[in-house]
Amino acid sequence: MIRALYIGRFQPYHNGHHYVINQIAQEADELIIGIGSAQMSHEPADPFTAGERVLMITGALQDLHKPLYVIPLEDINRNVLWVSHVRAMTPPFHRIYSGNPLVIRLFHEAGIEVLSPAMYERATLSGTKIRDLIACDKPWEDFVPPAVVRVIQEIDGISRIRALNQDDGDCPGR
C-alpha cells in the first residue's frame, strides 16, 4: 500500500493541480494533499483561507474513489524542521510528489522518496495567472474545476481578489 503526499498552496486549486493529482492517484493507493502556507489568507498572493481551499480540493476530487486526506500545513519558517513538522501534521506517507526544488531537497535529505510529476500546461495554469484574470475581470472559470468555481462564487472570492488587488494598476482599462 502506497500513501503519497502532494503539497501546494492551491491559491486557487486549478486544472494543473487536478491533472497532477490524478496522475499521482494512478500510482498511489491513498493521497494526502497538504495545503501549504495554511495560515495565509486575504492577501493578493494568498486570497483564500485554508478552509476555503479544503472545500475547493475536496469538491474537485469527490470522484477520486481513493482515500483522501486534505491537511492544512502552516509555515514554520525553519526549513531544517519543516519535514518533521509535515510528518507530525499528516498521516504517515511513503513518498512525496513535488516540483518545488526546496521541498525536493528537504524531503530527499530526510530520506523520503521524492518524485517530480510533470507539470500540466504550466504557462497557463498557475494560481498567479488565475488570480490576475479574476482581478482584471477576465474569463478564468475554464482554468479550474467546476467545484472550485462554485466555492469561489459561494465565498464571494471574486470581489475579495479584486479588492485585494485594487491598487496594483496591472489591469488595462482599470
Image: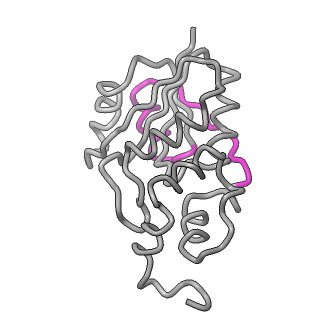
Q: Is residue 148 above or below residue 112?
A: below
Q: What is the x, y in percent for residue 23?
A: 70, 31
* Of 106 and 144, the residue lying toward us: 144
Q: What is the x, y in percent for residue 34?
A: 44, 35
Please tell me whether residue 108 belongs to the stretch shown in magenta: yes
Please tell me whether residue 109 belongs to the stretch shown in magenta: yes
The structure residue drawn at horizontal position 68% and vertical position 56%, both measured from the top left corner, is 143
Q: What is the x, y in percent for residue 101?
A: 51, 47
Q: Which residues are magenta?
A: 99-121
The structure residue drawn at horizontal position 49% and vertical position 44%, both measured from the top left corner, is 8
Location of residue 44 (image quadrant): bottom left
Q: What is the x, y in percent for residue 50?
A: 38, 45
- Name the outermost residue toward the front: 154
Question: Which quadrant of the figure contains the N terminus?
Answer: top right
- On screen, residue 83 versus residue 45, left or right, reads left
- Name the outermost residue toward the bottom: 173
